[in-house]
Image (tube, coloured by chain):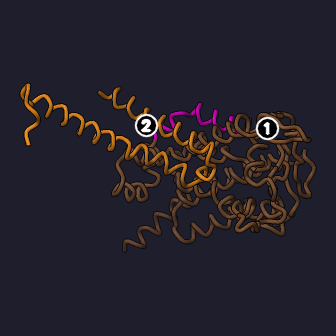
Chain colours: A brown, B orange
């Protein structure tokens, strides 16, 4: 599980598009693509307790990332299918490519926890994981233990890494960038929203995912390390202990699924990332021509 | 003027962040994909409106006090 990293990476993707795509890829497409995997699968991972009865996944990691389960929601296979569906429906290049890139960012970032994702689904259901930190979603611990483990491990480093990537490209968060790069790629959505909201609210809406990521990281970290009083191995502690070792923290059992050898993961992940960018880049002009043709057909 | 407006806008961002983090530390239900982004938008959208209204009202009250002759109460 990655937490605020997913909120930050959409701005990083937006900022680091190939030159020919800058100012032409939909921010909302990237946003939607990046959020789709967890929108579809996360709620049931923690489940809900009503009247003392817990409704939710019996084995969270199997549900979230495995097969059988909802693991296909974290595979490029689904990203490509939905992107193709969006293209067939809307003939909108900005939205389709944005969705694909956002989805890829999410699916490939999640290879870092100890469960990983089925990167080559449906060809294999084996997980690809580099086990950087422990996957800690459990039925009894729920969201709280998961957050505590994440923000005590290299997961925190992952969030901070993406946070710094965005900070280095801080202009991506400015009103100027929003006006010159974000709005032109999504003119219909922003002009529709602009009928109801002033510009300062529109800019805030654009920045809001970053804001949420920062606050989420701060709030959970403070709770886990200042407020919480966990009992670990029979000892009450002031806050959950940090452990920045590989597959940490030590105080929770890192869940996993059947997986490929760890050395294969960076190779396949980087190859898939390169392939997504290459395909998006290769299809960019033909899709632009097809979109223009579809638009002129609609007019005539 | 521009710099003052920029500073004022940062104050609203900071207020949104501090209040959201403060509330969310103790009420985790607030930490979700909808409330978080909406919290910021609400502060940036409505914060200056509310502040202007409060400032306008206190200025009107001040003006009314200034217009009142010494020794007399406000006109009824």
Residue at the image point whose x is 46% and y is 63% from the top:
A292
Place of residue B18 in the rendered image (x, y in percent of width and height, measured from the top left): 53, 36
Label 2 to label 1: alpha-carbon separation = 32 Å
| Disc number placed over residue B12 in the picture, else none | 2
Discs 2 and 1 lie in a common subunit: no
Query: Does A165 sit left or right of B2 as displayed?
Result: right
Majority SS type along the magenta span: helix
The residue lying toward the viewer, choosing from A225 and A271, is A225
| Disc number placed over residue A297 in the picture, else none | none
Residue at the image point whose x is 42% and y is 72% from the top:
A297
Location of residue A282 by image quarter:
bottom right
Location of residue A188 by image quarter:
bottom left
Residue A294 visible? The answer is yes
Is residue A172 shown above or below A46?
above
The residue lying toward the viewer, choosing from A179 and A243, is A243
**Comparing marks 2 and 1, which lies closer to the viewer?**
1
**Residue at image mark 1:** A240
Query: Does A153 sit left or right of A33 as displayed?
Result: right
Place of residue A251 in the rendered image (x, y in percent of width and height, measured from the top left): 88, 41
Place of residue B72 in the rendered image (x, y in percent of width and height, measured from the top left): 7, 30
Q: Quadrant of the C terminus of chain B?
A: top left
Is residue A26 shown above or below B7?
below
Task: Check residue A79 for magenta coloring.
Answer: no
Query: What is the secondary structure assignment of the residue under circle 1?
Result: loop
Residue A30 visible? The answer is no
The residue lying toward the viewer, choosing from A243 and A106, is A243
């Amino acid at each position: 599980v990655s937490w605020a990293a997913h909120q930050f990476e959409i701005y990083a993707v937006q900022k680091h598009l190939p030159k020919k795509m800058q100012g032409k890829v939909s921010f909302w497409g990237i946003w939607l693509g990046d959020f789709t995997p967890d929108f579809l699968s996360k709620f049931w991972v923690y489940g809900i307790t009503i009247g003392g009865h817990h409704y939710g996944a019996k084995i969270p990691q199997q549900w979230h990332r495995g097969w059988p389960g909802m693991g296909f929601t974290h595979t490029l296979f689904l990203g490509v299918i939905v992107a193709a569906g969006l293209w067939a429906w809307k003939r909108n290049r900005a939205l389709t490519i944005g969705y694909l890139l956002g989805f890829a960012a999410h699916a490939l970032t999640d290879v870092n926890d100890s469960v990983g994702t089925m990167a080559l689904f449906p060809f294999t259901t084996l997980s690809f994981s580099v086990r950087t930190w422990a996957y800690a979603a459990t039925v009894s611990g729920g969201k709280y233990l998961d957050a505590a483990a994440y923000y005590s491990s290299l997961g925190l480093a992952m969030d901070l890494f993406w946070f710094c990537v965005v900070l280095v490209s801080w202009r991506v968060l400015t009103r100027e960038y929003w006006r010159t790069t974000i709005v032109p790629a999504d003119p219909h959505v922003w002009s529709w929203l602009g009928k109801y909201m002033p510009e300062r609210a529109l800019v805030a809406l654009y920045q809001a995912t970053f804001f949420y990521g920062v606050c989420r990281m701060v709030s959970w970290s403070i709770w886990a390390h200042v407020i919480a009083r966990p009992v670990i191995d029979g000892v009450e502690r002031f806050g959950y202990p940090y452990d920045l070792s590989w597959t940490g923290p030590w105080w929770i059992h890192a869940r996993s699924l059947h997986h490929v050898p760890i050395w294969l993961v960076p190779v396949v992940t980087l190859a898939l990332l390169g392939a997504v960018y290459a395909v998006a880049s290769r299809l960019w002009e033909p899709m632009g021509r097809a979109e223009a043709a579809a638009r002129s057909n609609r007019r005539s | 003027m521009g710099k003052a407006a920029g500073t004022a806008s940062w104050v609203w961002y900071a207020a949104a962040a501090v209040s959201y983090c403060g509330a969310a530390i103790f009420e985790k239900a607030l930490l979700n994909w909808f409330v978080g982004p909406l919290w910021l938008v609400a502060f940036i959208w409505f914060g200056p409106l509310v502040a202007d209204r409060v400032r306008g009202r206190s200025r009107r009250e001040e003006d009314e006090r200034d217009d009142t002759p010494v020794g007399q109460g406000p006109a009824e």
